[in-house]
Amino acid sequence: MAVLRIGVDDTDSVRGMCTTFVAAVLEKRLREMGFEQIDYSHLVRLNPNCPFKTRGNAAVSLHFRVGDGMVGEAVETAVKTVEEFYEKGFETTQPGVVVYRGEDVPADWAGFALRAVREMVELKEALRLADRHGAQLFMFNGGRGVIGALAAVALPLENPTYEAIAYRAPHNWGTVRRIDRASVVKLYETGLTFDSYDPVTDEVRITPHTPCPILAGVRALTPENALKGLSMVRFHEKVLMTTVFKTNQATDMHLVEKKISALKPYSNAVLTGRVAAKPVKTAGGHVFIKIDDGTGEVFLAAYRPTGRLREVVYGLRPGDLVRAMGGVKPKPQGLTLNLEKLEVLELAEQFVTRPPKCPSCQKRMESAGRGRGYRCGRCGARLGVNHAEVVAEQRSIRPGMYEVDVPARRHLSKPLCL
Ligand code: ZN
């Protein structure tokens, strides 16, 4: 018997299809051939900052035990299934299939997979890795997908989450999903799952907005709860099939502590530093702030869709100590960290000056002009600038952890409620 691990990536386009659907079909076919599935199929979210990702940048892997004489047949089924379903006619859709025979995944391969979640990795490196470990590669239309397929095969999922996905019958693809909203709200209220519904925006979160074959996906910390949650949702259309995936979604796996001087474009980072200047709000409603960690300075960005997080950033003042988490993008002002989460560790005391009270009549004095001290409006008394009253600024924010609004959250980001 051989353990067969099959990775698949990049079968979808902006128009449709979905790599998880290809995995679900393949999983069903391999089971029907009598092979023993040794783990849930893995749904792996790769670096969310990759500039040439399609949508959520997902890759998948399947894990089966196969009789030695049947390996060829299993591999052929995998390759044929990908060939059958991938979106043809798109230059950017470059499917890759990786097949590895082995009980354990080599450590350097797992390391490569982790890097594919956290930063940019090159096709060259992926090909060398596959060669070194005798993995079989199948590449279509250029085959850049082998990078994700290799990562999906080997990514360690030690504290995974699960997603139970229901798929639509092909004749319904591209039409409005018929789903009972009230049943989703009820599911949300059970607390069995996460990310099913956003009470702030009244948005159902389990259905995608793309023309892909997914009807709904329900996320939970255990496979049982994911399935139970999905079974609570009422659909007014046919469910073609249901599959549970083990995933790195909502795990923060992409985030790594870094120094500002070591930041690379399109990577992900956790930075700890002090605010170096007052926040700036643009006309478009985006908020930027500069921090310094002793090795360098970088801008943090809270864009409009991040919602209430912008108010937190706007409330920061020079000297405040923060931990910032997010993706690093090259921008005209230099490398910029797009915030996913922000922890305010320490507020530096801020002082502001105001006119003193009049010593004779206790009325608050007025400025007599820049650098010219203060004047009492009632009795005409004068005081010099050095009599200004210095008071601590009333801060609008408190120390604590803050995150982007739900619609702006990435698949990999761990919601604070978890
Ligand atoms: Zn007075």
Image (spheres, helix red, strand yellow):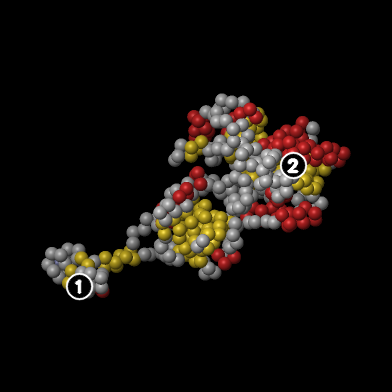
Quick check: marks 2 and 1 in contact, CB under 8 Å? no
- Numbered label tally: 2
In the rendered view, does 413 fall on the left or right side of 67? left
Residue 82 on image: x %, y %: 73, 39
The quadrant in which residue 61 appears is top right
- State the image coordinates of residue 113 (x, y, percent, origin top left): 69, 53
- Residue 97 picture location, percent across and down: 74, 45
Question: What secondary structure is marked by label 1?
Answer: strand
| Position of 234 relative to 73 (above/below) | above
Q: Position of residue 79 (x, y in %)?
A: 77, 40
**Residue beneath label 1, please?**
383
Judge whether residue 197 can be spotted in this image: yes
Q: Which is nearer the eye, 366 or 335?
A: 335
In the depicted view, which residue is nearer to us: 235 or 121? 121
Q: Is residue 297 above or below residue 146?
A: below
Classify mark 2: helix, strand or loop.
Answer: strand
Position of the N terminus, as image quadrant, is: top right
- Dot 2 or dot 1, earlier in sequence: 2
- Residue that appears at 60% across and 52% down: 51
Q: CA distance from mark 2 to mark 1?
A: 81 Å
- Kindly identify which residue carries mark 2: 63
Q: Can you see residue 345?
A: no
Task: Identify which amino acid the numbered label 1 is placed on.
Answer: Leu
Quarter, ligand 1: bottom left
Q: Residue furthest left?
A: 379
Which residue does the image show at 44% across and 40% down from the upper left?
A: 200
Front residue (pair 138, 274)? 138
Q: Is mark 1 within 8 Å of ligand 1?
A: no
What residue type is disc 2 on?
His
Q: Residue at x 64, y 45 (%)?
A: 58
Residue drawn where x is 68% and y is 41% of the image: 89
